[in-house]
Image (cartoon, grey):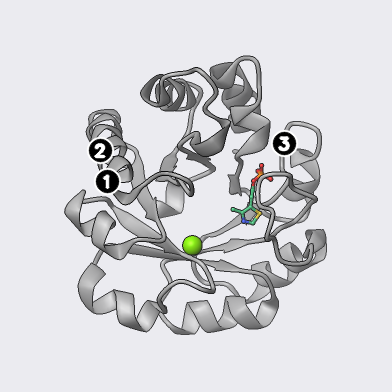
Amino acid sequence: MKSLSEIRLYCFSPGSLLGDRDPLEVVAAEIRGGADVIQLREKEASKRSRLELGAKLRDLTRREGILFIVNDDVDLALILDADGVHLGQEDIPIEAARPLMKEKIIGVSTHSLKQAKKAVASGADYIGVGPVFETRTKMDREPLVGLDLLAEVKDICPVPYVAIGGIGAGNIESVIAAGCRRVAVIGDILLARDVEEQCRKLRSVLS
Ligand code: TZP
Ligand code: MG
């Protein structure tokens, strides 16, 4: 199983970008293209259907030896024996999740240096930092943080930090130039004509 420090390309289940595809096929393509992590992120699905898809994704990611993280729901993460959970600023706080998650991974979304410091102090195993660029995926997004925050987080963050928000083949080099080698990408991958090839393209520049 891949360790957290090794992760570079952080990918997602298709959610509302599924179209007429099979979600398992889409995630399999992300993995063939080099995804290091798959997050179950199905904002519009019922909890039961998240559980059903999650069970399939857990099997797939385990077979492939990559990390499987569940968005928002500690209970689903535990039921699915996921490697971890990802919590936003409005989800339950890390202090409430840790006794349940124990040694499992807890990731936290952060949108400022203050939030990044707090997440780290609370024991986050990794943090997300964003939205770096304009995104069409998250309608209720926080104000853009830009590349500057990535550089600031680099100086204070002892755990892996993952840039998110509007990242794609057209701007990934600027994220790397800001010192960040880990990116989470939704639209640029899931809206690409060839998901596997798009992942390969992004993964190849993240050494
Ligand atoms: N958190 C901050 S921006 C974002 C999330 C979940 C959406 C990222 O999607 P995209 O399509 O890669 O901009
Ligand atoms: Mg959330």
Q: Nearer the viewer, mark 1 or mark 2?
A: 1
Horizontal side, residue 185 vs residue 53: left or right: right
How much space separates mark 2 and mark 3, taking CA atoms? 29 Å
The quadrant where residue 75 appears: bottom left
Q: Residue 147, relative to residue 6: is it above or below? A: below
Q: Give left or right: position of 51 versus 33.
A: left
Q: Is mark 1 within 8 Å of ligand 2?
A: no
What is the secondary structure assignment of the residue under circle 1? helix
- Residue that carries the numbered disc 3 in the rendered image: 168
Residue tagged 1: 48
Disc 2 element: helix
- Tell whether circle 3 marks a residue whose Cβ is less than 8 angstroms from ligand 1: yes
Q: Amino acid at mark 1?
A: Arg
Q: CA distance from mark 1 to mark 2?
A: 6 Å
Quadrant in the rendering for residue 85: bottom left
- The CA distance from mark 3 to mark 1 is 32 Å
Number of marks drawn: 3
Q: Residue at x 23, y 78 (%)?
A: 99
Q: What quarter of the picture does the N terminus occupy? A: top left
Between discs 3 and 1, the one toward the N terminus: 1
Q: Amino acid at mark 3?
A: Gly
Contact (CB < 8 A) between labels 3 and 1? no
- Which labelled disc corresponds to residue 52? 2
Q: Residue at x 51, y 23 (%)?
A: 33
Discs 1, 2 touching: Cβ within 8 Å: yes
Answer whether residue 80 is visible to the viewer in this image: yes
Q: Nearer the viewer, mark 2 or mark 3?
A: 2
Q: Nearer the viewer, residue 120 or 51?
A: 51
